[in-house]
Image (cartoon, helix red, strand yellow):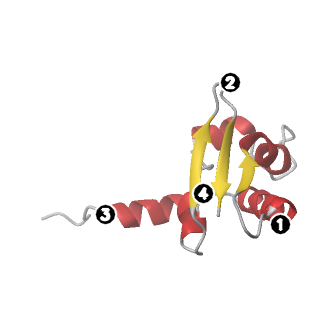
Amino acid sequence: MNTINPISKDQAISAHVENIPDSIIDAVNKLLIKYVEPNGVTIIHVDDILAIACSDDPDSGKPTRNEVYDNRWLDIEPLYRKLGWKVSFENTDDGAGFFSFS
């Protein structure tokens, strides 16, 4: 008899987003406040998020850029969709990604 049961897609997504560091969410929130377009689309660039949320100093308590990418901690869309935002992610030709919030 199995004592461990499979999880649903929603459970996997919930568990994943619960592990996103506060520094990532705080950076996105700060950028939303700074750039919000009340009647349009707010664009937030990944580089701007990482500049606020990350550090190469291991004593800072913030993740490194590599940790963020390795753990897929920029998968923030479910968190903000749950709060009523329409969120999408796009990459430009030069590889610079950005989120669109409306």
Quadrant of the snapshot with the C terminus: bottom right
Which residue lies at the image location 23% right of the left edge and 66% below the top edge? 3
Q: Nearer the viewer, mark 4 or mark 2?
A: 2
Residue farthest toward the front in the current orientation of the protein: 39
Q: Nearer the viewer, mark 3 or mark 4?
A: 4
Q: Is residue 24 left or right of residue 6?
A: right
Residue corresponding to mark 3:
7
Residue corresponding to mark 2:
94
Residue corresponding to mark 4:
76
Tell me which label, 2 or 3, sits earlier in the chain. 3
Q: Amino acid at mark 3?
A: Ile
Assign a secondary structure to mark 1. Answer: helix
Tell me which label, 3 or 4, sits earlier in the chain. 3
As measured in the structure, the alpha-carbon distance from the residue carrying label 1 to the one carrying label 3 is 35 Å
Q: Specify few, some or many for label 4: CA neighbours under 10 Å numbering under 14, 14-19, or 20 or more.
A: some
As measured in the structure, the alpha-carbon distance from the residue carrying label 4 to the one carrying label 2 is 22 Å
As measured in the structure, the alpha-carbon distance from the residue carrying label 1 to the one carrying label 4 is 16 Å
Q: Is residue 85 left or right of residue 31?
A: left
Q: As displayed, is residue 69 above or below residue 31?
A: above
Q: Amino acid at mark 2?
A: Asp
